[in-house]
Image: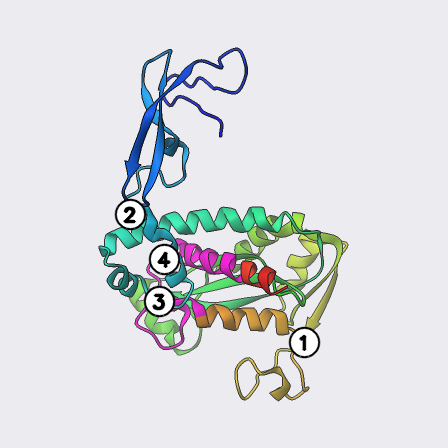
Amino acid sequence: MRIKCTSCKNKNNNSENEFNFVRIGKYYRTSDSSYVQRYRCKNCLKCFSSATFQACYRQNKRHKNEALRKLLYSGVSQRQAARLLCLARKTVVRKFIFLGIQAQEVLRKSNLLFPPCKVIEFDDMETFEHTKCKPLSITLAVEYKSRRILGFEVSQMSVKSTLAQIALKKYGPRKDLRFFGRRKLFRTIKPLIDPRAIIKSDQNPHYPKDVMRDFPRASHEKFKGRKACVVGQGELKKIGYDPLFSLNHTCAMFRAHVSRLFRRTWCTTKKSERLSYHLAIYAVYHNQSLKKAA
């Protein structure tokens, strides 16, 4: 670990300032039953510890983080998690944000370790924030067969169907930002995809332009969306199989493990960025599970 004084910014990484820091004992941290090394900088005489450089620095009850993470990707709501872990609801919210930001970074870095994808599938799934009058779109991209989640993007979308008039009257006009969401997602996952990859999707009329813009050398295969009599069972579709099974199965897994995506639930998203955090927490678990199964 590279030691850097938080006050004078000296680094203990070469022989010239090798003795700029001295150890001054340890202290016992009761939250995780561990001893933490303490240091003193010889230049400014300020004290710090090895915990200063950890991501969860100054975080109380850090030993609850892993248990909370497991609950969040297991379909448990934040309020229920607070009851199960004997934590205050505000504490769970703070930890949820911390775990979500951490998961987004882990997902990005872990995907860079794999070779470029030859075949991917992408599509949009819909949910809402606060009320069905405020719909959201989740653009999701997965690797074909392996079902590894490459990335996702949450975007605001306009209201459809019979709720359009009610939403317009109560909340005013709502912009459709799905185009920008797809554009941002494609630019994010571009380093993960082979330039001549095969990209599969349904026959949404907006998709060909988006694919051509960011992946001009890729092949875009489009399939007509077909409903099954039982969700997730491709063999019950009229054509006998699901051509976008990897994607649709992953979407179903999101619905089954993220509480705010349940079809009939009290849990709803209040802020779109919090939905992104929750999706990232599950996505990391999903990809790690695939790696263990392999």
Q: List x then y, in percent, for residue 104.
A: 48, 50
Q: CA distance from mark 3 to mark 1?
A: 31 Å
Q: CA distance from mark 2 to mark 1?
A: 46 Å
Q: List x then y, in percent, for residue 154.
A: 47, 58
Q: CA distance from mark 3 to mark 4?
A: 11 Å
- Give the foreground label among 4 and 1: 4
**Which mark sits nearer the N-terminus, 2 or 3?**
2
Q: CA distance from mark 4 to mark 2?
A: 11 Å
**Which mark sits nearer the N-terminus, 3 or 4?**
4
Which numbered circle lies on residue 285? none
Give yes or no for residue 79 being in the magenta stretch: no
**Which mark sits nearer the N-terminus, 4 or 1?**
4
- Give the foreground label among 2 and 3: 2
The span shown in magenta is 257-286
Q: CA distance from mark 2 to mark 3?
A: 19 Å
Q: Amino acid at mark 3?
A: Val
Q: Amino acid at mark 4?
A: Ala
Q: Secondary structure at mark 4?
A: helix
**Which mark sits nearer the N-terminus, 3 or 1?**
3
Which numbered circle lies on residue 243? 1
CB within 8 Å, label 4 to label 2: no
Q: CA distance from mark 4 to mark 1?
A: 37 Å
Instruction: Look at the magenta stretch and give its main secondary structure.
Output: helix
Q: Secondary structure at mark 3?
A: loop
Figure check: 171 above or below 4: below
Residue 120 appears left or right of 250: right
List the residue tagged with mark 2. Answer: 61
Q: Amino acid at mark 1?
A: Pro
Q: Amino acid at mark 2?
A: Lys
State whether residue 177 appears in this view: no
